[in-house]
Amino acid sequence: MTDWLNVTEAATYLKVPPSYVRRLVLERRVRFHKLGKYLRFTCEDLDAAARPIEPIISVSRTRRRGSLPSMPSSAFGRRRPAS
């Protein structure tokens, strides 16, 4: 049988504030079950949400730091005056 945790118990299990658990639910980053107006979680679902996310490997930069890529003038909806 599965043990169901409410928001407060889930926050204690994850060692975070209850507001963080509610934010995880709002962002759909943790699996939850609604029983009427109440949220319930399983320990397996909380463990899956607490796994660290692998970092994205950075791509080498070919342009200087802080420089923006050039955009065509049509991207802004108006034409450049002819010179």
Image (cartoon, rainbow, N blue to C red):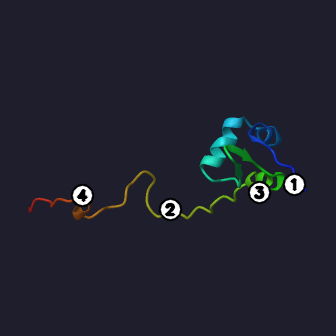
Which of the two labelled residues, at mark 2 and mark 4, occupies the earlier sequence position?
A: 2
Residue 17 in percent (x, y) is at 72, 35
Q: Nearer the viewer, mark 1 or mark 4?
A: 1
> Judging from the image, what secondary structure is the residue with disc 4 in?
helix
Q: Which residue is mark 4?
A: 76
Which of the two labelled residues, at mark 3 and mark 4, occupies the earlier sequence position?
A: 3
Say which amino acid is labelled 1.
Answer: Thr
Number of on-image labels: 4
> Judging from the image, what secondary structure is the residue with disc 3 in?
helix
Q: Which residue is mark 1?
A: 2
Alpha carbon separation for disc pair 2 and 4: 26 Å
> Judging from the image, what secondary structure is the residue with disc 2 in?
loop
Which of the two labelled residues, at mark 1 and mark 4, occupies the earlier sequence position?
A: 1
> Is disc 2 in contact with disc 1, using a CB cutoff of under 8 Å?
no
Q: Which mark is residue 61?
A: 2
> Is disc 1 in contact with disc 4, using a CB cutoff of under 8 Å?
no
Q: Which residue is mark 3?
A: 48
Q: Mark 1: give few (<14), some (14-19) or many (20+) Cα within 10 Å.
A: few
Alpha carbon separation for disc pair 2 and 1: 49 Å
